[in-house]
Image (cartoon, coloured by chain):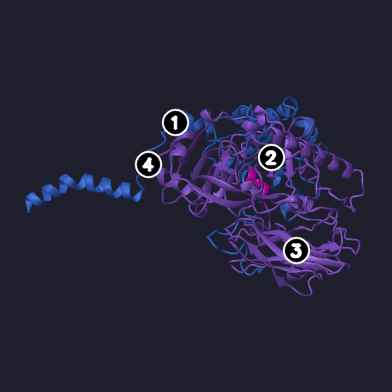
Amino acid sequence: MDSQKTDRREFLKRSAAVAGGLTLGAAEPALGQAVAPVPANILGTDELVGYGDRSRFVTSERIPHGGRASPDTFGLDFHIATPLQDSVGVVTPSSLHYMGTTRGSYVPDINPAEHRLMIHGMVERPLVFTMEEIKRLPSVTRMHFIECAGNRSNRRHTTVQETHGMTSNAEWTGVLLSTLLEEAGVQDDADWIVAEGVEEVKGASSIPMTKAMDDVLICYGMNGEDVRPQQGFPLRMLAPGFEGIFNVKWLRRIKVVDRYYMTYNDYGHLTQDPVNAALGYQIGPKSVITHPSGGQQLPGKGFYEVSGLAWSGGGRVDRVEVTTDGGLTWTDAKLRGTAQPMAHTRFTFEWDWDGSACELQSRCIDEIGQVQPSRAQVAEFWNQPPDQPPRVRGQDNSIQPWRVDSDGSIHNAIA
Amino acid sequence: MAVFTMRLLKFLPLLMFLGISANAQSPTFGLGRTPTAGEIEAWDIAISPTGDELPVGSGTANQGSELYLSKGCAGCHGTTGAGGLAPRLIKRDVGEVDDPWQYGRVLPIRSPFATTVWDFINRGMPLGQEGTLTPDEVYSITAYLFFLNDVIEDDLMVLDEVSLPQIQMPNRDNWAQVPDWFPGQPRLQGYPY
């Protein structure tokens, strides 16, 4: 009893010392002051016990993207970008995963007990699956990024969220589409599938059978729980490395067909130019430094771990190089963890900033040898007029330059 | 010999059955059920360039011109097919051109297939009331948009599930197909980036 009293008295004394210390200048620690104040407590609630929440001091948020409100006055969502500047590791939290819709869309409120996936067309056995049945089939779990075709940096953007936020990376769980197609029995002349969702426009995409049988996933799981409604709950398709629109959400139907259908989403890709058609299909090798990045502030010279994300629709990231002198010299960055096919890969680079103005860039080299280009390299390859700003054809995978001013401020350096 | 032939004939159906089902990848897991014809038809809304999935129905540009107003198309796309908030539906006035792409990003003139225009209207219009148009109405509005763009010249021409896929759009063979795709291939042959 006595010792408890003593402890209590000691605790009160320490608290007073901490409280007193707070009134002093932070740079002048008072004798007996703690390094940091004793924090307040978060009181337990049934809600927090049921489903956890992040700290109130963490305020990282997605933002509307593409020059249009999300939600708009009708409650439609268009494009929403991920706060890559705050990202660590490779997993995008489900709540922060980017979202894209074709023309602005309501998010369907689907009861999974009523949801069905139909596979029909050029198959021996048309089939309808319940969610329960799909979850009984052999599953796979894989890391994959998704990236919107509109993820295009321009000189007006100030942060990496604006320049690159329309890509995210998650752990996806589901059934290989090949498992379902083999179950239905694909006929010999079938070269394409049409995949379709339940939302109001029932966005449909044509996908080649070679892709469908290779690595396309029919996903019900995302980052260890059910796919979120904004991401296609209860079922979405994942076509790893293909542009975002092919990853059909709220999936209800796969029709096996003999040709490219030029249906709703396909028409959006219609072009006269074979180069643009090819470069707006499979995502190229790409990377971006997320820290330090545009809008951030270095407190002073000294050591920093430069960190970023690299990915490619062509396979695994093989190597990432970083320059701190605007592209004169390049050094290999370290890849954190094992690079997965068609997945964001974290790279880091140890940097001692001498306090002078400089420019940071990164470039990705993937396992099939594709190299992320500078905008100048793209312009040169296509013989674009040198007196005009470079134009990256198809999906933009060009190098993102960040200018570090001597005051430590970071700026988008696209000219 | 006769007995052997008899036996072979007796087992022939079984052999044929095994052969066919092996070829067609017999089901492994036995999950899922067979959809009814009605269930398939209700969802089978992506229209092939061949028009296979088109429902029975018909309409003319003349009928479509009234529907264009009564269904609210004009409210977003403009009474003349231009000048509204929504994408324009009438080709740009660039005179006679060799390349139909110069008419602009206008669905009923740029699309390589008439079926794509029908499909687009059927699944995506009117905004907020998608799926409410009857097949006859979609045939009529499609015909009207083709008439506006000189794809068809007769406002009484009947478009139906047979005639619509036969319309030769000016860009029928004038568009870039995506490259054949195989695992591990670069995005564009000869392009290092």
Give the colour chain B carries in the figure. blue
Residue at image x 76%, y 52%? A85
Q: Amino acid at mark 1?
A: Ala
Residue farthest toward the top in the current orientation of the protein: B70
Tags 1 and 2 both on a single chain:
yes
Judging by the rendered image, the residue that carries numbered circle 2 is B146
Task: Tell me which numbered mark, 1 or 2, is placed earlier along the sequence.
Answer: 1
Q: Residue furthest front?
A: A2
Label 1 and label 3: CA atoms lie apart by 52 Å
Helix, strand or loop for the magenta stretch, by majority: helix
Badge 4 or badge 2: first in the primary sequence:
4
Amino acid type at mark 4: Phe
The kind of residue on which mark 3 rests is Ile
Provide the letter of the chain coloured purple.
Answer: A
- Tell me the magenta residue range: A265-270
Where is the C terminus of chain A found, in terms of image quarters? bottom right
Tell me the SS state at disc 2: helix
Q: Residue at x 61, y 27 (%)?
A: B134
- Find residue A399 and name its label: 3
